[in-house]
Amino acid sequence: MYGAESAKIYYAQHTARGKDYLAEAEVVAEQIHQRFPGASSVLDVACGTGGHLKPFTELIGPTEGIDLSEPMLELARVDMPDIPLHTGDMRSFDLGRTFDSLTCLFASIGYVDSVDELNQSLSCFARHVVPGGVVAVEPWWFPETYVDRWVSSDVVEWEGTTIARVAHTVREGDTSQMQVHYLLASPSDGVRHVREVHRAMLFTRKQYETAFEQAGLRPEYVPGVLSGRGLFVGVRV
């Protein structure tokens, strides 16, 4: 879970890089409306700092967000004070209401710890959409599409601070382990080093589809969209 410092770095990095939340939301909204043309509400699970919330409000209708990290939600509330935001675990949250559609993007589903927790999460998602409602989940890489020992890097400027990021990801069994190192440099604070470790499950396509089906969702996999990982879209039967 992202703490206060990690949440601020996440927000700064993706904002400075110009992550195109609107374009991503357009892809997802199109898939939702193909299956439920009248969909007019969205719950964004693992919404983070809320980059997709405003676009979904414009493209679909009233949107709410939920995330396990309160520091991430605090940043989202600054930008979107009028959008309801909730603290909750994707495996077990209960908002006591349903939506026409539910999204879980940016491969956040990969942070669950097992197939059982994947099943729990999809069941939780299904409970929060109306009959005929749509659940859209962006997966992490499949075992056969994951590239072992991948290195990525970038440097951005944000509000007087230079942020250099280097990441190295290795496979360990059915998981990927990403070591991320940040150097943050500013005139007032000098240079600081921040290290994070991200563990994500390498579920198979079949495991995702089975989790959808067991939750009462009819799944379809849309390949190649978003970051190339594709999108699972399920309709509640």
Image (cartoon, helix red, strand yellow):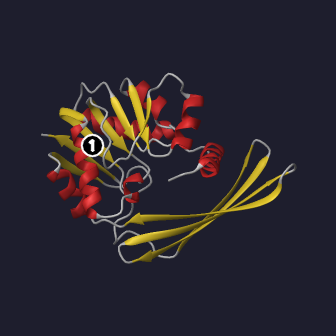
For the image, the number of numbered tags is 1
Looking at the image, is 89 positioned above or below residue 149?
above
Quadrant including the C terminus = top left
Query: Residue 49, can we see it?
Result: no
User: Which residue is found at the position 76% from the left and 52% from the top?
Assistant: 162
Does residue 43 appear left or right of residue 186 in this picture?
left
The residue singled out by tag 1 in the image is 125
The residue type indicated by label 1 comes to: Phe
Query: Residue 99, can we see it?
Result: yes
User: Which residue is found at the position 22% from the left and 47% from the top?
Assistant: 123
Q: Quadrant of residue 184?
A: bottom right
Q: Nearer the viewer, residue 38 or 88?
A: 88
Q: Secondary structure at mark 1?
A: helix
Where is residue 75 drawn, in percent x and y?
Answer: 59, 37
Looking at the image, is 181 positioned above or below residue 18?
below
Where is residue 221 drawn, in percent x and y?
Answer: 26, 53
